């Protein structure tokens, strides 16, 4: 396995371990299938390293042609959209599910379980519970370290750019 893919795989395993640990101690954790508020309110178009895109590309290529066409249309519309936040063009808006869940980017794996030093939590649902003191015993992951490891994977490009290069 190439070095960057191996590093991404290890990052996934480390995030999984953190997520499992939080879930084990909080069996009714909010994040789950159908809770898609974060996918519907992305601050920006998702950015991915080449290794993340290679994995995501595998998931996209395995979708039914008509589903992929629909996603491609949404990505093209997103490329010229100036308003923010944005809805992830990959989200199945009817079911609230991610069609490429197994291949999703790192940001989607860590969101809801990691905290960034200067920005704190981002999801309103989780922040509300935190403000009420209900998640006081949660040992959050450190998102700054995730960001550092993503930087080591190389340059990131917007999802719309990866799609445009794929379509050429
Ligand atoms: S981060 Fe928030 S909005 Fe996203 S799945 Fe978890 S609880 Fe739901
Ligand atoms: S890639 Fe999947 S999990 Fe990530 S924001 Fe899009 S729909 Fe949500």
Image: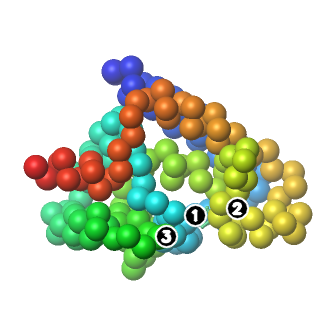
Return the x and y of residue 65 as percentages of the image width and height: 15, 63
* Residue 116 appears left or right of 152: right
Residue 140 lies, in percent from the top left, at 74, 46
Judged from the image, the secondary structure of the residue bearing numbered disc 3 is loop
Left or right of 52, for residue 150:
right
Dot 2 and dot 1 residues touching (CB under 8 Å): yes
Confirm or deny contact between disc 2 and disc 3 (CB under 8 A).
no
The one nearer the camera, 37 or 62, is 37
Q: Earlier in the sequence, mark 2 or mark 3?
A: 2
Q: Along the polypeptide, which appears first: circle 3 or circle 1? A: 1
Residue under pointer 2: 29
Instruction: Tell me which corner region of the image, top left, top right, bottom left or bottom right, holds residue 16.
Output: top right
Name the residue that disc number 1 marks.
Answer: 32
Residue depicted at x 65% and y 38%: 144
Residue at figure coordinates x 58%, y 48% from the top left: 110
Can residue 91 be seen at all in this image of the molecule? no
Mark 3 lies on residue: 85
């Amino acid at each position: 396995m190439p070095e960057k893919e191996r590093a991404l795989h290890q990052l996934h395993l480390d995030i999984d371990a953190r997520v499992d640990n939080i879930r084990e101690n909080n069996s009714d954790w909010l994040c789950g299938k159908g809770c898609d508020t974060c996918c519907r309110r992305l601050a920006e178009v998702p950015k991915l390293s080449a290794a993340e895109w290679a994995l995501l590309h595998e998931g996209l290529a395995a979708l039914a042609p008509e589903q992929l066409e629909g996603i491609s249309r949404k990505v093209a519309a997103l490329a010229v959209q100036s308003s923010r936040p944005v809805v992830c063009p990959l989200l199945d808006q009817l079911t609230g599910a991610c069609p490429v869940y197994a291949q999703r980017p790192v940001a989607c794996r860590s969101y809801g379980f990691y905290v960034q030093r200067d920005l704190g939590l981002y999801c309103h649902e989780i922040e509300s519970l935190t403000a009420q003191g209900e998640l006081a015993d949660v040992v959050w992951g450190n998102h700054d370290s995730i960001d550092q490891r993503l930087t080591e994977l190389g340059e990131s490009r917007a999802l719309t750019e990866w799609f445009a290069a794929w379509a050429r």
